[in-house]
Image (cartoon, helix red, strand yellow):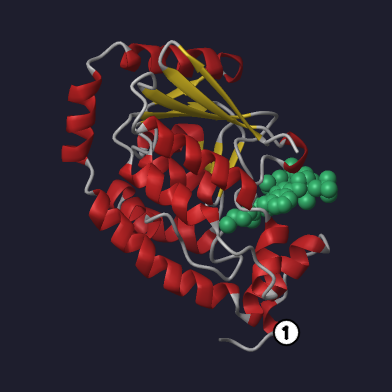
């Protein structure tokens, strides 16, 4: 099977394109694995000076594949969940990461941005963190990074209500560097990545290590993982996943609180 992550290395920029547009680039275990492999490889390959993340179609990503969430909740998950390797690789990356976000960035689609060094948003970008709506908890160290970035009040509202944050607000709140015209996003992000690729890579890498406490972030991910896995196994989460599959609104009053 061809991968739903397309990669291209040109001019020192390794572009990783989420390429599952018919499913809004929802991320499968296979896709997380390929992303993790590439980010890990970049740490030791001097030809890769910048990583660039983007999505095909009308959305950056709809987040974790809901079918896979439902399978895990039913005890049929994959042996190794590559999402953890992906998130650790991103948190530990000393290679700069640029993200080009168009349309919806849901769940991990938004929380991964907190680990990116430059975030470029298209005008139509919407950041959505529906963890509580799915009876889950935030992941990717976002329970630490989002309040740190935008303050507790705004972070609580984003997590608790799960409503879309538009591009201009995300820019004003410091989640993004720039808002671009929809049809210019890829070119603008590419130009930014090329500008960074021309800088001294050793200096950038040393600067990133000073700016980001990767150990602290990975520790937060471990705490979140315990709660996340408890929540995945809850009746509330099963109701949320069934509702998505059946294209209806969840009814949490039907299930006992866990
Ligand atoms: N996992 C698996 N499939 C997904 C998906 C996901 N996270 N998100 C979307 N899809 C699929 C839909 O099931 C649909 O498939 P179908 O054509 O076979 O029915 C297809 O992608 C298009 O999605 P649709 O819901 O029709 O598009 P939309 O533009 O109306 O809405 C979203 C887009 C992203 C708002 C909506 O799909 C959504 O809320 N997805 C779930 C997001 C989510 O909660 N992710 C987990 C975060 S922790």
Q: Locate residue 160, reporting x and y percent.
A: 49, 64
Q: Tell which of 239 and 3 is nearer to you.
A: 3
Question: Which residue shows up at 32% across the image and 52% down it?
Answer: 145
Q: Is residue 139 above or below residue 223?
A: above
Q: Is residue 98 above or below residue 217?
A: above
Q: Tell which of 225 and 185 is nearer to you.
A: 225
The image quarter containing residue 223 is bottom left
Q: Locate residue 12, reporting x and y percent.
A: 40, 15
Q: Residue furthest right?
A: 246
Instruction: Report the side of 125 relative to 190 (left or right).
Output: right
Residue beneath label 1, please?
Answer: 254
Q: Is residue 50 above or below residue 184?
A: below
Q: Locate residue 173, reporting x and y percent.
A: 35, 40
Badge 1: residue crowd in 10 Å (few <14, some 14–19, many ≥20): few
The image quarter containing residue 61 is top right
Image mark count: 1
Q: Is residue 233 above or below residue 204?
A: below
Does residue 193 appear in this view? Answer: yes
Q: Locate residue 99, reporting x and y percent.
A: 46, 30
Question: Which residue shows up at 64% across the image and 89% down it?
Answer: 256
The N terminus lies in quadrant: top right
């Amino acid at each position: 099977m061809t991968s739903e992550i397309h990669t291209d290395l040109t001019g020192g920029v390794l572009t990783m394109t989420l390429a599952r547009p018919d499913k809004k680039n929802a991320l499968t275990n296979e896709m997380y694995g390929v992303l993790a492999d590439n980010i890990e490889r970049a740490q030791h390959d001097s030809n890769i000076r910048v990583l660039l993340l983007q999505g095909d179609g009308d959305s950056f990503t709809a987040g974790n594949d809901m079918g896979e969430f439902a399978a895990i909740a039913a005890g049929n998950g994959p042996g190794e969940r590559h999402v953890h390797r992906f998130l650790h690789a991103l948190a530990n990356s000393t290679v700069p990461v640029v993200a080009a976000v168009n349309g919806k960035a849901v769940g991990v689609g938004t929380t991964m941005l907190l680990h990116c060094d430059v975030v470029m948003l298209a005008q139509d970008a919407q950041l959505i963190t529906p963890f509580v709506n799915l009876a889950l908890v935030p992941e990717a160290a976002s329970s630490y990074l989002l309040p740190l970035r935008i303050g507790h009040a705004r972070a609580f509202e984003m997590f608790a209500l799960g409503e879309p944050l538009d591009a201009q607000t995300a820019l004003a709140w410091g989640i993004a560097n720039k808002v671009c015209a929809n049809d210019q996003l890829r070119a603008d992000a590419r130009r930014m990545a090329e500008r960074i690729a021309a800088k001294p890579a050793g200096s950038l890498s040393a600067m990133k290590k000073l700016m980001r406490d990767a150990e602290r972030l990975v520790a937060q991910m471990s705490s979140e993982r315990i709660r996340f896995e408890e929540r995945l196994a809850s009746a509330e989460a099963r109701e949320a996943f069934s509702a998505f599959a059946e294209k209806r609104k969840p009814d949490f009053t039907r299930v006992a609180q866990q």
